[in-house]
């Protein structure tokens, strides 16, 4: 992997890790689907100039927007709203790694060599270690929603690899537009008191909407899409295993200093062990293998 792309991986993970905090803050003031719709509405407005028709690829773009946008993020924020601990959601979402890896081998005929297999196994073993932390079992609703969110995103990533000559913000624009309509409809149908929520939301709540919109989408997901167009899905997705580490660290800081309400994270040896295993595995995955870098072909 190129040095510049290693830097992009770090930026991407930092953005995603910070987003867990802003999203958790946001769903304490807004209903989950309403918060998600507002987040995508802001992105859609910003990216209007990139909303273009791509002949022959609109069906795939629509499915990616539904799965990787509305469904994934709707379930993700619903999981955060249902969970007491950010770590529960952050960890279970990483189950998308083996799902996307299996799908990439089956449908994209990607080749996974021994070094990457070792890194993926070690990284996933670290996530499994974290999952045995008792807090995960007290957030079962969050676990279920997180698993469904991870599955939706994994399928959308496979479809992303089939897109041809679609720029990062062109895809993000459609994802935001479709997700706004989809989640807005769901919110209006199943959630109530929209006007009261909007006028009573604090500056912190609105800041959470803006931060999640701009940092997660413009930096995090745009960077992620750029990376998977240059490298195999099975090589990039394991690198996101760093995200729960950043999310847990951020949540611990917020909990310790009582910066926001609703955070009560703890840390122990099991969390430290699982985090260490994950980071070592990610480091192994990032070692370049001959013949794997596909960027010259794109």
Image: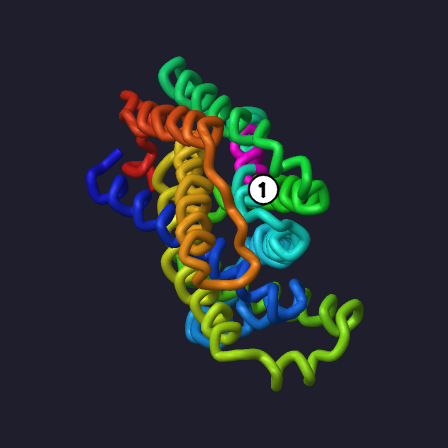
Kindly identify the residue that appears in the image at 40 percent across and 62 percent down: 215
Report the front residue among 38 and 205.
Answer: 205
Q: Residue furthest right?
A: 189
**Residue 93 lies within the magenta run:** yes
Question: Which image quarter is the N terminus in?
Answer: top left
Kindly identify the residue that appears in the image at 34 percent across and 33 percent down: 294
Report the front residue among 155 and 127.
Answer: 127
- Is any part of residue 56 visible from this angle? no
Kindly identify the residue that appears in the image at 61 percent across and 38 percent down: 135
Instruction: Judge left or right: residue 291 versus residue 265.
Output: left
Prevailing secondary structure of the magenta residues: helix
- Is any part of residue 269 visible from this angle? yes
| Residue 132 x/y as whole percent | 59, 27
| Residue 85 x/y as whole percent | 58, 47
| Residue 184 x/y as whole percent | 68, 71
**Location of residue 156 with respect to 180 vertically, above or below:** above
Report the front residue among 22 and 112.
Answer: 22
Kindly identify the residue that appears in the image at 64 percent across and 50 percent down: 83
**Helix, strand or loop at mark 1:** helix
Region in magenta: 92-99
- Residue located beneath label 1 in the image: 88
């Amino acid at each position: 992997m190129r040095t510049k792309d290693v830097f992009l991986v770090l930026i991407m993970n930092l953005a995603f890790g910070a987003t867990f905090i802003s999203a958790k803050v946001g769903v304490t003031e807004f209903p989950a689907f309403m918060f998600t719709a507002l987040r995508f509405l802001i992105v859609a407005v910003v990216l209007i100039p990139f909303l273009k028709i791509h002949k022959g690829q609109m069906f795939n773009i629509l499915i990616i927007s539904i799965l990787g946008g509305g469904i994934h993020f709707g379930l993700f924020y619903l999981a955060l709203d249902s969970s007491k601990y950010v770590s529960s959601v952050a960890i279970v979402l990483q189950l998308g790694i083996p799902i996307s890896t299996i799908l990439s081998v089956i449908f994209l005929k990607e080749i996974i060599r021994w070094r990457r297999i070792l890194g993926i196994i070690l990284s996933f073993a670290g996530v499994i270690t974290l999952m045995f932390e008792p807090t995960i079992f007290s957030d079962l609703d969050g676990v279920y929603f997180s698993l469904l969110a991870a599955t939706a995103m994994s399928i959308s990533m496979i479809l992303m690899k089939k897109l041809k000559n679609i720029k990062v913000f062109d895809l993000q624009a459609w994802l935001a537009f479709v997700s706004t309509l989809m989640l807005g409809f769901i919110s209006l149908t199943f959630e109530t008191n929209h006007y009261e929520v909007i006028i009573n939301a604090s500056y912190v709540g609105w800041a959470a909407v803006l931060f999640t919109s701009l940092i997660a989408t413009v930096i995090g997901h745009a960077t992620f899409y750029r990376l998977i167009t240059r490298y195999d899905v099975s090589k990039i997705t394991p690198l996101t295993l760093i995200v729960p580490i950043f999310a847990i660290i951020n949540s611990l800081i917020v909990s310790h200093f009582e910066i926001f309400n609703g955070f009560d994270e703890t840390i122990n040896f099991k969390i430290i062990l699982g985090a260490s295993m994950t980071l070592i595995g990610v480091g192994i995955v990032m070692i370049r293998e001959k013949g794997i870098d596909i960027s010259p072909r794109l």
